[in-house]
Amino acid sequence: MYEAVHARPDGESTVSRLASTAAEYGFAGIVIRNHGDALPDYDRASIADTYGIDVVSGVEVRAEDRSRASGFVGNHRESKTIVAVHGGDLDMNRFAVEQPAVDVLAHPMAGDGDVDHVVVKTAAENSVHIEWSLREVLRAEGGQRVSALRDLTKLRDLIQEYDAPYVVSADPRTHLQLRAPRDLAGLGEALDCSESWIESGLAAWGTLTTRNRERTSEHFVEPGVRREASDDR
Amino acid sequence: MNPLPKHVRQRWRYLAVELESWPNTAIDRRAFQRELWFAAQNLLGDVGSSRVDLTVEQFTFEDGQGNAIVRTRRGATADARAVLACLADVADEPVGVRVSGVSGTVRACEEKYLGSRPEATEHSDVAFAGADRSAVVRNGRVDVRIDEGFVGATQRDLE
């Protein structure tokens, strides 16, 4: 199971500290999803080696309008394994799910954000994973938390109805905000969804990573077609 | 009142909980218990919090790290985990919380999950992000003081 985190300078912990805590908590990997204007500087392979955890390069594109967002997605697509779009307003949510180049629509319900059946259906067609973000359930209080819970229920109903791909995350910004997969699964049960809903959402980050790494590998030609090494001639 | 016969007594589960925070944070048992009750009430309501019935059995916390044993009713461990996961702050300080294991007795819980001795803490000056700063070092993990707050780092991040 994977977790997607914001490291320093977006958050208050460095990539290696998050990796060390996540490894201790039993995660198989972390996706570094800093916003495009606050990317961290880190040595992916050696951190992964030290703590025995997969470290995945990623980005969360944050832009004011579609054309800029589309430019940012294009810029990052080559160098990052996971490209997410900072959701939370109607237009940006719609933009993200219409782009097959986007992997994840992050926190679509944040702020004034909302989704409808069209957004979720489009996400399923383009295989854009919708994030089911637990950050407000874990860290907000009162009315804000209640409305976040209501939004999550709506989002889950839609995702299940249209069989759309999704990811689950606690969206931590420090190592203190990380929560172990078992504890998140417990929280899922308290929110009336099964343990497996949370687990497959956390695992989906890993599946996405494997898929994208495969696609950027030199053997890949197109889905279903691979170029094999020709040593046996 | 007479003690209940054994077969009708309440069965308990004991959760070993690992706690972490910034090094200047002080948390005591009362604050933790209070926060736990609030968290249960907020997440599960009156009915749910009476059902999990969380009680702090043991508590130690020093220099920003600690552990606790929390008692819950048997069959309510998933809800207890959920409540603990939602514990974002204690006494207005952020805390990292993880359930490291669940046992049927306090002693088993201690021996199996809280056996390790607390790691030695060391205060020192480190070079981080282009300046010398004061920091607290613990088993490769480094909390660096920057302005009013801290940054979580490791030995690898030091220059």
Image (tube, grey):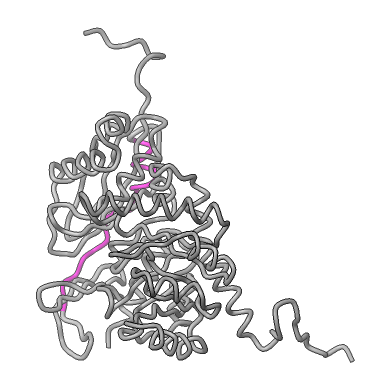
- Report whether B129 appears left or right of A61: left
- Whether B112 is among the magenta residues is yes
Residue A213 vs residue A65, the one in the foreground: A65
Residue B78 higher or lower than A85, as above or below: above
Q: Quadrant of residue B77?
A: top left
**Residue drawn 63% across the image and 79% down it:** A214
| Magenta stretch in the rendered image | B107-124
Residue B99 higher or lower than A122, as above or below: above
Query: Does the image show residue A218?
Result: yes
Residue B97 vs residue A142, the one in the foreground: A142
Q: Residue furthest right?
A: A233
Q: Give coordinates of residue A51: x percent, y percent.
A: 44, 71
- Report whether A128 appears left or right of A92: right
The N terminus of chain B is located in which quarter? top left
Q: Quadrant of residue A125?
A: bottom right
**Residue drawn 42% across the image and 31% down it:** B75
Residue B133 higher or lower than B141, as above or below: below
- Whether B85 is among the magenta residues is no
Q: Give coordinates of residue B4: x percent, y percent.
A: 31, 11
Q: Residue furthest top?
A: B2
Q: Quadrant of residue A172?
A: bottom left
**Residue drawn 24% across the image and 32% down it:** B46
**Residue drawn 46% across the image and 53% down it:** A156
